[in-house]
């Protein structure tokens, strides 16, 4: 059976990270940030449970306030100051007026906008991280009624994922500012949230669609994006993207861990359940895949690679056997005719 990433235990035991800025040599603690944006400062002490704090983050529109509240909520949880509790998740997370949301086809290229490639890429990545904050909190809040079934560990893990994503958003926001831009300057699409909505009623589907598909795409894209930024001579941005991709490994692996747990509770075979859920929710598995990182996270290749699916593998095996028979017959004919 699949084995999640060996570093998962260490990730779970780590204290909340205050390295929320990007210094000359990598992640570092910010000089000032205790109060955070006004919208965040007003909400830090509110919420008597992790689920209530998550709902507060989801209803907060300002991205930096959302990130600040996330860190405050997870820090309170890690200090033992909050129960999981119960709350209702909104249908959609609150969003600022900018960026303008358009369809995927309507998102302009960096050339059409006259924006440098590195800033364009960082803005897209900041948007991914902002969605990831909300996706993780939506998982905590939406499934809070299942706390007795899932246990506190489930909610602790996804609150930690949210905290990681909030730190990543901060790094990208800082780098955008250094380049003369800010999150909201370029149009974005909301495809990521639509995929989240597909899995709103089923925790096994949520694990399959978000960590094992969406976050795994981050493992695939990370090295390519790093190389693009190096090609653009932006090594500072490349270093940030590389660090984020490295940290996403835990998020994919924790999704696998809980997917396996939920399948066990439901008496389902994980590989077959994963393929059924992906098909049911119309999720497309697109390569090229970063097999090395996916293997490290623990996702079996036959779960996502069409060529390795059991029925395909079986068909290929059958074809191979037939070819072997043909070759043997040809050899026999050749020897008889010789």
Image (tube, helix red, strand yellow):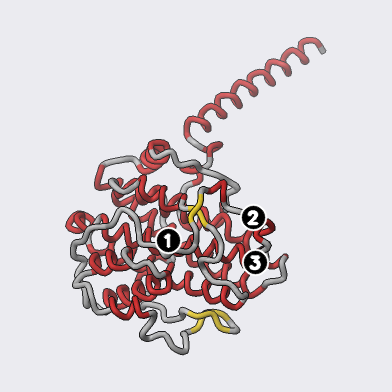
From what the image shows, is residue 64 above or below residue 323?
A: below
Residue at point 30% right, 49% down? 203
Q: Is residue 131 visible?
A: yes
Comparing 198 with 326, the one in front is 198
In the rendered view, tell whether residue 92 sits above or below residue 323: below
Nearer the observer, disc 1 or disc 2? 2
Label annotation for residue 132: 1
Q: Kindly state the secondary structure of the residue where label 3 is placed.
A: helix
For the C terminus, which image quadrant? top right
Question: What's the CA distance linking mark 1 and mark 3?
Answer: 21 Å
Q: Residue furthest top?
A: 337
Q: Which residue is mark 2?
A: 109
Residue at left 42%, top 40%? 278
Q: Position of residue 137 (x, y in %)?
A: 33, 62
The answer to whether the residues at label 1 and label 3 have Cβ atoms under 8 Å apart is: no
Q: In the displayed image of the protein, which residue is found farthest to the bottom?
A: 31
Q: Nearer the viewer, mark 1 or mark 3?
A: 3
Q: First in sequence, mark 1 or 2: give its number.
A: 2
Q: Which residue is mark 3?
A: 118
């Amino acid at each position: 059976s699949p084995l999640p990433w060996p570093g998962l235990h260490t990730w779970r035991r780590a204290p909340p990270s205050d390295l929320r800025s990007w210094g000359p040599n990598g992640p570092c603690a910010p000089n000032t940030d205790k109060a955070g944006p006004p919208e965040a400062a007003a909400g830090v002490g509110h919420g008597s449970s992790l689920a209530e704090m998550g709902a507060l983050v989801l209803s907060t529109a300002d991205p930096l306030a959302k990130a600040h509240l996330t860190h405050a909520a997870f820090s309170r949880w890690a200090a033992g100051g909050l129960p999981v509790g119960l709350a209702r998740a909104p249908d959609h997370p609150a969003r600022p007026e900018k960026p303008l949301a358009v369809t995927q086809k309507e998102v302009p290229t960096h050339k059409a906008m006259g924006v440098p490639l590195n800033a364009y890429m960082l803005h897209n990545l900041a948007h991914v991280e902002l969605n990831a904050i909300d996706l993780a909190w939506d998982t905590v809040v939406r499934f809070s009624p299942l706390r007795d079934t899932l246990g506190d560990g489930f909610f602790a893990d996804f609150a930690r994922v949210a905290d990681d994503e909030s730190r990543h958003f901060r790094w990208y926001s800082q780098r955008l500012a250094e380049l003369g831009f800010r999150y909201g300057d370029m149009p974005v699409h909301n495809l990521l949230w639509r995929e989240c909505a597909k899995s709103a009623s089923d925790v096994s589907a949520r694990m399959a669609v978000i960590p094992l598909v969406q976050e795994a795409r981050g493992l695939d894209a990370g090295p390519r994006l790093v190389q693009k930024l190096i090609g653009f001579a932006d090594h500072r941005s490349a270093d940030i993207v590389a660090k984020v991709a490295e940290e996403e490994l835990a998020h994919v692996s924790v999704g696998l861990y809980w997917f396996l747990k939920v399948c066990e509770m439901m008496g389902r075979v994980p590989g077959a359940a994963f393929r059924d859920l992906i098909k049911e929710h119309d999720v497309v598995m697109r390569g090229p895949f970063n097999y090395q990182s996916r293997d490290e996270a623990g996702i079996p290749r036959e779960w996502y690679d069409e060529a390795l699916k059991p029925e395909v593998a079986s068909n290929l095996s059958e074809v191979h056997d037939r070819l072997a028979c043909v070759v043997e017959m040809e050899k026999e004919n050749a020897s008889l005719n010789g």
